[in-house]
Amino acid sequence: MKSSRNVFYLLFFHAALGLERVRWCTVSEKELSKCNAMSEAFGGAGILPPLECTAGGSAANCTQMIKDDLADAVTLDGRLIYQAGKEHGLKPVVGEVYDQEIGTSYYAVAVVKKGSNITINSLKGVSSCHTGINRTAGWDVPVGYLVDSGRMAAMGCDLPKAVSDYFNASCVPGANGANYPKSLCQLCKGDSAGQNKCERNSQEQYYDYSGAFRADVEAEASALPDTCSIGMFCLISGRSLSSWARQLRSQDFQLLCRDGSTADVTEWRTCHLARIPARAVVVRPDTDGTAVFQLLNQGQQRFNGVGTKFQMFDSAAYSAQNLLFRDATTELVAITAQNYQAWLGDEYLHAMQALSCNPNTDDNSNAYYAVVLVKRNSSNAFTISDLKGKKSCHTGLGRNAGWNIPIGMLIKRGIIKTRDCDIPQAVSEFFSASCVPSAKQDNYPAKLCQLCIGDNSGNNKCSASSQERYYSYSGAFRCLAQDSGDVAFVKHSTVFENTDGKNTESWAQNLKSGDFQLLCLNGARAEVTQFAECHLARVPAQAVMVHPDTSIFALYGLLDKAQVYFGNSSNENGFKMFDSSTFQGKDLIFKDSAVQIVPVEERRTYAEWLGSEYIESLEGMQTPECAGAGNQIRQYLLMTTVIPLLTLCQIQALD
């Protein structure tokens, strides 16, 4: 009777939640075999809803199948949870617990020998040991953290090259392919016969957690370069090590903390690179996570102990490891905040975002970023709060990235203080000297042109033209590069266009992008590749404006069709939409640098199109007490902000 009541309750519970079945997606044949055994075991125990198994073949395929409603659930690790959440909107609903002490996470830590004098801020140039390429604690987290924190620059998003340039030498098992820098395998040992060096398996003695730590331990006794004995840097997990290391004393090692300090190895909860989330079961947003947990919870109560043929957290019967769930799992728990960001946590999330660097997206072609550029200088690493008294280089008076945005932002934030609405005077009093091309006017302070150099003959100084060698983006950058100024206000792409051999002029030939940094509004410094996170404002592209009653769809249809025939600069149809040379002008109707017209999508109001950062900079240049002033700059800005409620399309161009 009691058994019948239980079955009735399960049926009722299942019906109430509306799940007729749970289709589990498997990533391998062995996992499919275990899943079928779990389905049979659950069915025999009367656990509902029914569990069905389907072959996905890979985690990526499974997430796509779940999105397409061809499957319902799969267990993923942190990296795949990030991708599934970001790309497909899947949510984590059930998490693995590995032991009562650590719970639903473990920690990626940086371990060094005590007395090495290494901190998280002095890693560049030391030697490094990693658990393996693309391993979570040994690669994803540390590399992502170093990039995210601005310590490591990844040009072109080439992370292996970035790691190779950052560390003196490394052992990264698995990084032995033709496309990897050789230094990533330089410290690897191979097997006892010296074979299989840098393989991503146990034949490489420095592979996995214990292997990376072993590289550190054996460094002084080995024939490795001397730098290893004084600079070994290990990226491993905070969990227990293999038996070979039990003779070692933990007090001989220490952890590197994110704040630059060190700590005892037992303090991994507070001193780590990132908390790594446990694996989790993910489902579609519309799937009831509670029902999935109840199904698995009933299963773990019946099949997670001695005396049952099927074991949920043991894969030995299938000659494999970690099938469906990690074998180290002690229990499954329901996830309360069912979104991938909350489950991953800020530390891990930021590392993954940095690791997802994509060269096809560091540069948004329908906008650019206004940035504060400085030279890298460890002995004088001033911040944006220390700009007073510095020498400044600007693209030109009234230019967005070189004047309007930086000056407006500094005024808005109270860093530059104005009197009597006289912005040029305030700027001249704030900086010790400047070059602001076109500021050579009777009513403008002479200091605004003090750093300008004019043409090769010294003429046309401070003119808003190419005759002033410090004019526009490359000119302002040249002003900084030649040490005339301490800071340059430019767009984010300026440094890349004039360094690393891109600019062949004599003044730029030997410049390297890595010799420059960005100043962030939060007081930090960042690498020039991190402009999307460290900038003054995102500057929107030009937009076509219409009356609210105009059919934007009809107009966009007209322009979109027109650009098919007349948008390409090499078209033979006569008229060129994005070329004004025939009319003896520049940027007529559209910018000459435009390549395409595209829809604004959801950003249909002036505030949405301009963005809060850009609006903040405009507000800084238009303080309430100066609203009636009529100088040229303020008139320009007032025209800029009179925007209709509806925008039609954006122009892919850079100012």
Image (tube, rainbow, N blue to C red):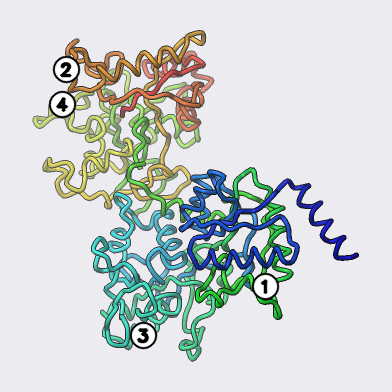
**Which disc, if any, is residue 218?**
3
Q: Is residue 126 above or below residue 460?
A: below
- Circle 2: residue type: Glu
Q: Are marks 2 and 1 in contact (CB under 8 Å)?
A: no
Which of the two marks, 1 or 3, is nearer to us in this view?
1
Return the residue at label 2: 572
Q: Is residue 102 visible?
A: no
C-alpha gap between disc 4 and disc 3: 62 Å
* Nearest to N terminus: mark 1 or mark 3: 1
Q: In the image, what residue occupies the spot 27% across and 42% down?
A: 495
148 displayed left or right of 274: left
> Dot 4 lies on which element?
loop
Return the residue at label 4: 467
* Nearest to N terminus: mark 1 or mark 4: 1
Quadrant for the C terminus, please: top left
* Nearest to N terminus: mark 4 or mark 2: 4
Q: Where residue 113 sits in the image (x, y, percent)?
A: 42, 79
549 displayed left or right of 171: right
C-alpha gap between disc 1 and disc 4: 71 Å
